[in-house]
Image (cartoon, helix red, strand yellow):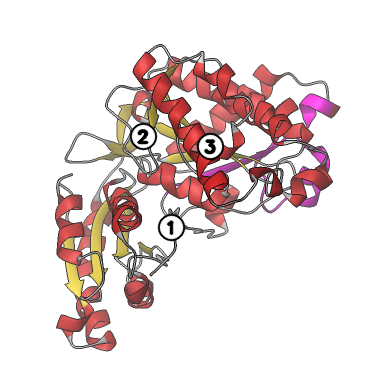
Amino acid sequence: MKIQAYRRANGRFGIRNHLLVMPTSVCATATAERIAALVPGAVSIPNQHGCCQIDSDLSLTQKTIVGFGKNANVGAVLVVGLGCDGIQASAAAAEVAETGKPVQHIVIQECGGTLKAIAKGAELAAPMARELSMQKREECDISELIMGLECGGSDPTSGLASNPTIGYASTKLVDNGGSSILSETTEVIGAEHLLAARFDDPVQREKFLSLVKAVEDRAISLGEDLRSGQPTPGNKVGGLSTIEEKSLGCMYKAGTSPFTGALDYAEGVPEAHGLYFMDTPGQDIDSITGMVAGGAQLVIFSTGRGTPTGSPIAPVIKITGNPETYEKMPDNIDINAGRIIAGGATVPQIGEELFDMMVEVCNGGMPKAESLGHHEFGIYKLTGTF
């Protein structure tokens, strides 16, 4: 099966061709946003971290923003740093440049302040944008696609209709040689034994189980009970009563493929294609950000209650199993899987419809979140800011 995408120097293919203006810290975010606003085709990310973080937390921020720069949907990158921030712009640029894509960087303190940095940044970004505009899509195999699987604002219809539909599409993608990422560690608690049984590699199985246990232990060490936040108030209003009930519905997004491996947050998907689990929080935006940093070019998002979330560089397709939500939020929802519950449709029928839309979006079609300009971005934090 073939799609039309943009070839990168490292052999990867992107389904979008973004020029990413990438701030290394919150101190550089406003300047990066103004540069991106001056250059058609450029997009920035609202990084709220990168300063006064320590050790593993700072490393996670750097891995996440660099992962965005490396994502195949990005054709060129301008890194914007303040100068005294924890992540140096030159170092982040050097990491992204390993992919072979065009990369430039500026430092606000070295440019002489905000206005001169904006002018210098726009001067560097404009020719990169022109070069990207000349690039044509090429035919490539759909096995080049890495898909992130997300759910948010879940209700009972998510586990009955929309998540199984996503699972159908995920299994079909993996069967065609592509990759999918199941995420949200808090939302597999109670069902982890069922997922663990699908790991063929015992080392990866143990890593998966250790990731789940670490989340539970972290909450306990803080004196907190995960059940105070999961299910969320919205989940409960929608009809979900326990974290286990939510997890048993969430896991259907993984379809029926065996798991190839388990990934840390924002860890890059290996060359070996297949189904992966990534350790992300249940918070939708942080979770999507981690998967996109790991290489996901497309995200499929199931929502029972309805949510508008998108991503700065990866199109997000919305599907609901709740026919009332589909009627109430026509601006946001792409696929109505509520027809499985109320219209006599089957999971394979809606799954094929979803897969067809995935191919259309890969070829340049815009799902609703992308057409509305939803660019939500958030990085998972391991500890407080000091």
Q: Is residue 327 magenta?
A: yes
Three-letter amino acid code at disc 1?
Thr
Q: Which is nearer the eye, 302 or 52?
A: 52
Q: Is residue 56 magenta?
A: no
Percent x, y of residue 207: 39, 26
Residue indicated by mark 1: 383
Cα distance, mark 2 to mark 3? Answer: 33 Å
Q: What is the quadrant of the C terminus in the image?
A: bottom left
On the rendered structure, is 5 left or right of 250?
A: left
Name the residue rendered at 36%, 41% in the picture.
294
Earlier in the chain: of badge 1 and badge 2, it is: 2
Q: Residues within 10 Å of mark 2 (few under 14, many from 20)?
A: many
Residue indicated by mark 2: 4
Name the residue rendered at 47%, 58% in the picture.
377
Earlier in the chain: of badge 2 and badge 3, it is: 2
Three-letter amino acid code at disc 3?
Thr
Residue indicated by mark 3: 185
